[in-house]
Image (tube, rainbow, N blue to C red):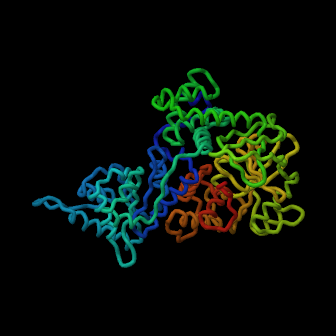
């Protein structure tokens, strides 16, 4: 209803688990990595848990898109089954024919024997078998015990069945029971999905709207995004419900921008029971106060080292006409439990920045432990097969790349300056230049940064440019082998071609990594393949 009004191709906040809209936060990438680890074989259980609405099923759908061709997969989404019903469902999902006796009721053995024979045949053919059970907190204890017994099906070298359990937090409590200790000991990997932080909530909203066609500024102002996070607790499903209703309300009122007042009204309609939670308002008041201070001149409120920064939300990059000079820094102190004696304030030094872009590339090269002599540093680095990459990116993609890079500040003033982005958290960015580090709020960074980002990456052998559809050669072979390794598949046995099948693998990898999805292995995709392959490259710090 409101999509065209906001310049969108479709409504972005459907609660259906659409993998195209999957926002891959750091923890969602780790969750997906745990599931992909499960398809590599080895037996046992992989456990993925999370609160309702944190994205477990959406991650699972993305995982299903990336299951390698050599994997046979059974998926059960309604596990309220008896032991016999479970075994019948497993056999049905694997396509196993079961001949049941007519003269007596079916037994467990009637299903186990053909299942074991199928698993042995698959193993002999070089295939892996994975059973995925969603909503696994609904499994009865006797069914969980039968699942444990299924992992006893094995050869001398390996177990024949990998089981992935996906469920709510009570699944962890179930596996902690003494009677299920033997099963718990067979969990080889586990991951618990948390809700999104405040900065991630803003990135999540922007990501879904941009995937659905948003071209201009985000129609949520900063205070509205902070209220979205406070009202939803960072749970993606709740964010979807609230933002969908808020956009509908703005559309109905003819507003081009979703404001804090619009969100408050949507909260009353979507979450009426929590709309007036008393404890939430003081926190929101603090967030609004800090936001106003940031907008009024808190551009680079940082001292040497890393300071604590509270209640800060992402802002969209300012336009060139909004570029602002550095104001006198304003320090916001958060009192401890017991106030300490007053300490005389020290003047905060202005941030050190570089005026020479070439010097910024030389400083970035130092993080790679590479020589960058005077002259054109990118030409010198290219001789080491390390290439310079520059593009306008938003913070969500930079988080996914997780590598240090050069940010260009004040580009619209005609006198740009440069610094190395060395750390990025939900609330702050750490900039390094000329041997010093400054930590700034994301709101402060947005006042002076329009998205220009440069970084280095180690190009694979044969790279000259992004390969075209139908291309062959060393680079396409490298991509095919790295994708197979990252997704737990078999490496190709013949020369690779960038055909529809390989492009589908590239798209799945791009989607899982939170990159633009086009099925072509450009620099961003190659960077993430390097990372997935364990290539030794510097990493962006993600903790304060």
Looking at the picture, tell me which residue is in the foreground, 164 or 197. Answer: 197
User: Looking at this rendering, what residue extends furthest in the top direction?
Assistant: 253
Taking 397 as reference, is 122 left or right?
left
User: Looking at this rendering, what residue extends furthest in the bottom direction?
Assistant: 156
Looking at the picture, tell me which residue is in the foreground, 268 or 167. Answer: 268
In the rendering, at what x and y percent does residue 175 appear?
Answer: 37, 59
User: Looking at this rendering, what residue extends furthest in the front direction?
Assistant: 341
Q: Quadrant of the C terminus?
A: bottom right
Question: In percent of the image, x 71 and y 41: which residue is there?
Answer: 443
Residue 181 lies, with reference to residue 208, above or below; the image says below
In the rendering, at what x and y percent does residue 199 appear?
Answer: 62, 44
Residue 355 lies, with reference to residue 98, above or below; the image says above
Is residue 522 visible from the viewing direction of this image?
Answer: no
In the rendering, at what x and y percent does residue 430 appear?
Answer: 73, 52
Image quadrant in which you'd find residue 448: top right
Marker count (numbered)? 0
Taking 354 as reference, is 20 left or right?
left
Question: In percent of the image, x 61 and y 50: which residue is there?
Answer: 518
Image quadrant in which you'd find residue 421: bottom right
Residue 175 lies, with reference to residue 384, above or below; the image says above
Taking 518 as reference, is 350 left or right?
right
Question: In percent of the image, x 58 and y 29: which residue is there?
Answer: 4
Is residue 171 visible from the viewing direction of this image?
Answer: yes
User: Looking at this rendering, what residue extends furthest in the left direction?
Assistant: 103
Looking at the picture, tell me which residue is in the foreground, 371 or 110. Answer: 371
Question: In percent of the image, x 85 and y 46: which residue is there?
Answer: 416
In the rendering, at what x and y percent does residue 3 appear?
Answer: 56, 31
């Amino acid at each position: 209803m409101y999509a065209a009004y906001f310049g969108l191709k479709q409504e972005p906040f459907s609660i259906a688990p659409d993998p195209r809209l999957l926002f891959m936060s750091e923890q969602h990438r780790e969750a997906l990595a745990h599931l992909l680890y499960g398809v590599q074989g080895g037996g046992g259980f992989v456990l993925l848990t999370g609160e309702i609405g944190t994205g477990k099923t959406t991650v699972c759908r993305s995982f299903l898109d990336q299951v390698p061709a050599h994997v046979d997969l059974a998926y059960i989404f309604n596990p309220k089954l008896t032991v016999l019903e479970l075994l019948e469902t497993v056999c049905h999902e694997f396509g196993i024919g079961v001949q049941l006796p007519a003269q007596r009721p079916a037994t467990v053995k009637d299903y186990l024997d053909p299942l074991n024979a199928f698993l042995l045949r698959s193993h002999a053919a070089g295939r892996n078998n994975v059973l995925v059970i969603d909503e696994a907190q609904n499994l009865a204890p006797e069914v969980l015990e039968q699942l444990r017994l299924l992992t006893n099906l094995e050869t001398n070298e390996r177990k024949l069945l990998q089981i992935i359990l996906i469920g709510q937090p009570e699944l962890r409590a179930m596996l902690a029971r003494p009677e299920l200790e033997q099963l718990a000991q067979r969990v080889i990997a586990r991951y618990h999905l948390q809700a999104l932080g405040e900065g991630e909530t803003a990135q999540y909203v922007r990501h879904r709207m941009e995937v659905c066609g948003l071209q201009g500024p985000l129609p949520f102002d900063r205070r509205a995004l902070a209220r979205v996070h406070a009202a939803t607790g960072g749970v993606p499903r709740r964010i979807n419900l609230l933002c969908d209703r808020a956009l509908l309300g703005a559309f109905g009122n003819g507003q081009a921008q979703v404001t804090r007042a619009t969100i408050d009204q949507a909260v009353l309609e979507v979450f009426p029971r929590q709309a007036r939670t008393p404890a939430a308002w003081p926190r929101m008041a603090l967030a609004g106060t800090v936001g106003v201070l940031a907008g009024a001149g808190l551009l680079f409120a940082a001292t040497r080292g890393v300071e604590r920064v509270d209640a800060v939300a992402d802002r969209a990059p300012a336009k060139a006409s909004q570029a602002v000079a550095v104001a006198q820094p304003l320090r916001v102190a958060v009192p401890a439990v017991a106030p300490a004696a007053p300490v005389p304030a020290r003047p905060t030094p202005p941030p050190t920045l570089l005026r020479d872009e070439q010097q910024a590339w030389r400083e970035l090269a130092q993080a790679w432990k590479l020589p960058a002599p005077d002259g054109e540093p990118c030409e010198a680095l290219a001789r080491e097969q390390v290439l310079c990459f520059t593009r306008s990116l938003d913070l969500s993609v930079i988080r996914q790349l997780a590598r240090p890079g050069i940010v260009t500040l004040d580009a619209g003033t005609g006198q740009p300056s440069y610094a190395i982005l060395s750390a990025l958290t939900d609330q702050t960015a750490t900039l390094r230049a000329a041997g010093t580090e400054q930590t700034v709020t994301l709101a402060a960074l947005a006042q002076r940064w329009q998205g220009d980002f440069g970084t280095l990456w180690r190009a694979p052998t044969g790279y000259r440019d992004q390969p075209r559809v139908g291309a062959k050669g060393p680079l396409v072979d490298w991509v095919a082998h790295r994708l197979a390794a990252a997704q737990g598949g078999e490496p190709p046995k013949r020369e690779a071609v960038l055909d529809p099948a390989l492009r589908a693998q590239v798209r799945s990898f791009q989607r899982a990594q939170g990159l633009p999805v086009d099925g072509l292995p450009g620099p961003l995709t190659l960077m993430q393949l390097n990372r997935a392959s364990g290539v030794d490259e510097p990493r962006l710090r993600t903790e304060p």
